[in-house]
Amino acid sequence: MVRRILGLTTGRIAVGILTVMALLAVLGPLVAPQDPLATSDHTLAGFSGSHWLGTDYLGRDVLSRLLDGSRVSVLSSLEVAVTALVVGAVPGILSVYLGRAFEWVTLRLVDTLVALPFLLFAVAVIALLGNG
C-alpha cells in the first residue's frame, strides 16, 4: 500500500506536506521567530519582515502562535489515536483469545454504547462520578 501511494505523484506530494507539517509541529517552538505570548504595539498588523503572518489584536505574532499550537494539536491527535487503538484492539484480541463468554460480554457492552445516545451516556457518567 505504501509503494502504491508513493508511486503516485499526488501521494508523494501528500507525504511531503505531511512530513513538513509533522516536522514543524515537533520543532515549532525552536523555529518560531518570536515568543508566542509576547505582545507588541503593532496590533492587527499585516505581513512584515518581523511578523510573517502578521499580528493578532493583542500584537502577538501569528506565525509563532501557530507553530506553538500545532505541536499541542498534533501530539494530542496522536494520543487520541493510540488510545483508540488500545481501547479497540485489546478487547478484540482478548475476545478471540478468551473465547465465547468474553466475546459475548464485550459485544453486549459495545452494542449498549452504540445504542445509547452520547448525551445520555455523558449524563450517566456525570451522575456516577459527580461534578468535577
Image (cartoon, helix red, strand yellow):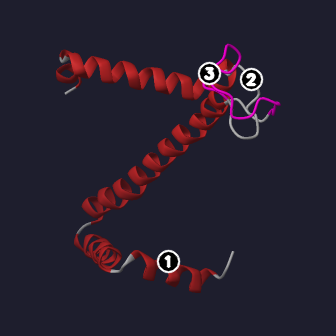
Residue at the disc numbered 3? 47
Please give the residue where the numbered disc 2 appears in the rendered image: 34
- How many C-alpha atoms fall within 10 Å of the one at disc 2: few (<14), some, or many (≥20)? some
Vertical order, 71 against 29 (above or below): below
Q: Earlier in the sequence, mark 2 or mark 1?
A: 2
Q: Nearer the viewer, residue 36 or 101?
A: 36
Q: Mark 1 or mark 3: which comes first in sequence?
A: 3
Q: Nearer the viewer, mark 2 or mark 1?
A: 2
**Nearer the viewer's eye, disc 3 or disc 2?**
3
Q: Say whether residue 41 is magenta.
A: yes
> 60 or 99, which is in the foreground?
60
Tell me the residue at 58%/84% (across/down): 128
Disc 2 secondary structure class:
loop
The image quarter containing residue 102 is: bottom left
Where residue 34 sits: x, y (%)?
74, 23
Label for residue 95?
Answer: none
Name the residue type under label 2. Answer: Gln
Q: Secondary structure at mark 3?
A: loop
Looking at the image, residue 45 sits to the left or right of residue 14; the answer is: right
In the current view of this chain or complex, which residue is farthest to the top? Answer: 49
Q: Which residue is mark 1?
A: 122
Residue at image location 27% in from the left, 72% down from the top: 107
Query: Residue sitting at 19 percent across and 27 percent down?
Result: 1
Distance (Cα) linking label 3 and label 2: 14 Å
For marks 1 and 3, give the one nearer the viewer.
3
